[in-house]
Image (tube, grey):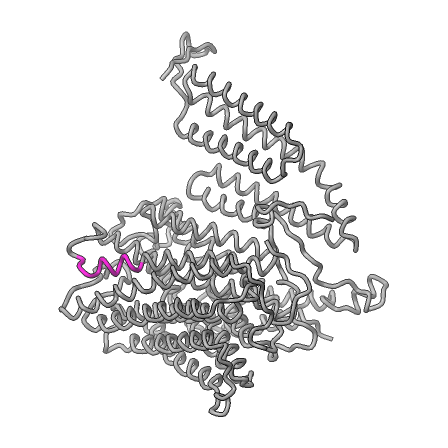
Amino acid sequence: MLTTGFKLWFGLVVAAFTAAVFVGYTTGGTETGPLTLGWKGAVGNHIAYGIFMMAAATSGLLAILSQSFRDADAEAAAEILQVEVKDVPEAQISTGSSSWPLFAALGVVTMAVGLVVHPLVFGIGLIVVLVMAVEWTMTNWSERATGDSEKNRELREGLLRPIEIPVLGLVGIGVLVVAVSRILLAASVLGAVWIATAVGTIIFLTAYFISQRPTIPRGVVQSILAVGVIAVIVSGIFAAINGERDFHHIGGEHEDSHVEEDH
Amino acid sequence: MKNESTVVERIVTTTDSGTLSRYWIFSALIGLLFSSVAGLLVSLERIDLSSGSIFSTTDEVFQFWAAHRVALVLIAVLPLMIGLATAIVPRQMGASRLVFPRVSAFSFWVWLFGALIIIIGFLANGGVGTPEATSETQSVALTLMGVLLTVIGLCGASISALTTIVAGRVPGMSLLEIPAFSWSVLVAGTMWLATLPVLAANTVLIYADLKGRAPVNFGSEQVIWEQLSWAFTHPQIYLWVLPLLGIVAEIISVVFKNKISNPFLFAAIGLMGLAGFGAYAQTYFDIGTPVFEEAFSIIQAFIAIPAVLLVIAFISPKIKDIKEFDKRATTPTVLATLSIILLLHGVVVGAVHVIGPLELATRSTVTAQIVLTLGSGVLAFMAAFSWWGELLIGKPIRQQKILISGVIIHCGVGIFAVADFLVGFTGQNDFTGLSEFTAGTKSSSWGDALNIASLIGSSLIVLGAITAIGVCIKQVLSKTPATGNPWDANTLEWAPKEKEEVA
């Protein structure tokens, strides 16, 4: 019996092959060239003909795979799972909320903007996309691992949390250190001291405020932290664009010591 | 387990098709406003180009002229259709959700960021380049990236909707038994997937020319708009509004209790899909001579008219059915009728403008056809919103307000299109590329009068877009619960869902 997947892919094979032949004959194909992959005669526009033929070949391969593995065939699934057909789990499992689509989109957008702005931004976007690809894949895998959603969640967390938490921590600290250092290096010597004091005081007071209110909603804490982190990162970017303050080097070229000069 | 997520978390992590649909629709309405304002500014400038009252150079006029078209297609009309499909298709298929809910969410976010980048690119003197090349290269590259991202988003959402139709139907429902709207989405989505990647490829090639090293040069850097314009003109624009035919068929069939013969209607919609395929009409992947392309364009123009007429013939109620008309459904029926009338005018103007001896191919007539066709898409959305509004936002719809905003848009599109169609005969050029950027060539007092009429039309379109956004926001904020099935329709989308996530 032909599976639904096979019918779909085979339909695409026919459509792509027809399109290739049509393009071939309307762009200079001769004799039976477009029908025989150029064996007897010319195929016309090579690019268009090649694209459609590749599409046909790829669809054909997927059709064969779909039929070979009996895609979406409940009887085949029941045989593998050794259960009755009526007990085969639903093909569409319920899907809850997920932050991966948003972060993956941010990664793709960062890559696109990076192509225009700077290779480093592109690199950051690429890393985000790769990380999201892993996270997304693992989430999808874990959701199908067993029939128990709680167990599935534990499976995923047991596997990925030991990696996620240290890596996220390192990245978070790294970003903040870089951003704060750019701010301090862009400010005057005295200004840097004041900024460091102000930032430290704000962090201390915010932490104190939160600790005194154990019932404070999680959303408020998240919002405060988000605003703080965004403020530091944005300030760091602006500081980096402005550049460091002037450093007046003294001594020879290989001397480490230097004197900083206020703006 | 208790759901402890915050409001912000729910907003950004949702994969619910209803919620994503609302995101698409609201964002697209904002895009419609941006596009309408850009069109209004160009209309204002056209009244007296020599004075430079709004813009100081023709390049600036070109930027906003191009922004109007790009935004109208990529940021307004297409996402409105995708938004409707995202909510309605799974319901009509009897599926609990879209087949790829996370891909749908990903697609929306990519599209949204892409749309923002396009707007920033245009406002930062980038856009799709300018005839005199005074635009900022970085901003042009940024706009191109925005176009690429929106195309990725639209393709992803289309794939999700198409797969739901193909693989997510309830058992026993064959393809020929699916509702007309889903069929039109199936045809439109397939054609979108056949053409949007071509637009993406064009964008990549232009970007490579713009930012790449000298050995890589496809010759598109100086003719950016010529490379992309096929996606924003005849015949391709028919594809962007194709779900309109399904919307109108659904509404008419229910309000007149008229059993529509599916296979023939479906064939007519498919014919319209073929009439709208325009990816061949671009300059890089040239499939033949310009004569060959022109022949295709003419054939499609004259296929589109019978295709629309066939759809109208199949959905028109018989005289005995008129008595069955449900007066509660006046608003969706009126808006649906107005939208298909606009589309019919659009395809007729499309056919007129390809007639060689009239020499209208590069005149303002082109703009008239685009605004008629895409305006019909916006009106179809308004009809769909008044029809499926309870499913889209979960609140009852104030029909009169939707009707008023729809009629304002209809009047605006009508006045604008008539004026631009007629002024095309006076010789006023449309921007079509490097060699013809002298829009608004003043040739007669008639031209002036028609340009003022065009300005009035543009103003009404902006007013209609603002009222539509206002009505939608007010409906969403309403506290009145939905009534369930206001039309006593028997299609599957009105069946109550067991559980809905609301973000």
Which residue is found at the position 50% from the left and 23% from the top? A181
Give the percent coordinates (x, y) of residue B131.
Answer: 26, 54
Q: Is residue B242 magenta?
A: no
Q: Is residue A66 visible?
A: yes
Instruction: Give the image quarter of residue A59.
Output: bottom right
Give the percent coordinates (x, y) of residue A208.
Answer: 61, 25
The extreme top residue here reads A251
Q: Is residue B260 visible?
A: no
Which sits in the foreground, A139 or B371?
B371
Q: Is residue B254 above or below residue A232?
A: below
Q: Is residue B156 above or below residue A237?
A: below
Instruction: Give the image quarter of residue A218.
Output: top right
Question: In this image, B366 relative to B168: left or right?
Answer: left
Question: In this image, B235 relative to A155: left or right?
Answer: left
Which sits in the foreground, B244 or B298?
B244
Q: Which residue range is magenta in the image?
A: B39-49
Which residue is found at the position 83% from the left and 61% from the top? A81
Which sits in the foreground, B340 or B160?
B340
Give the percent coordinates (x, y) of residue B322.
Answer: 48, 88
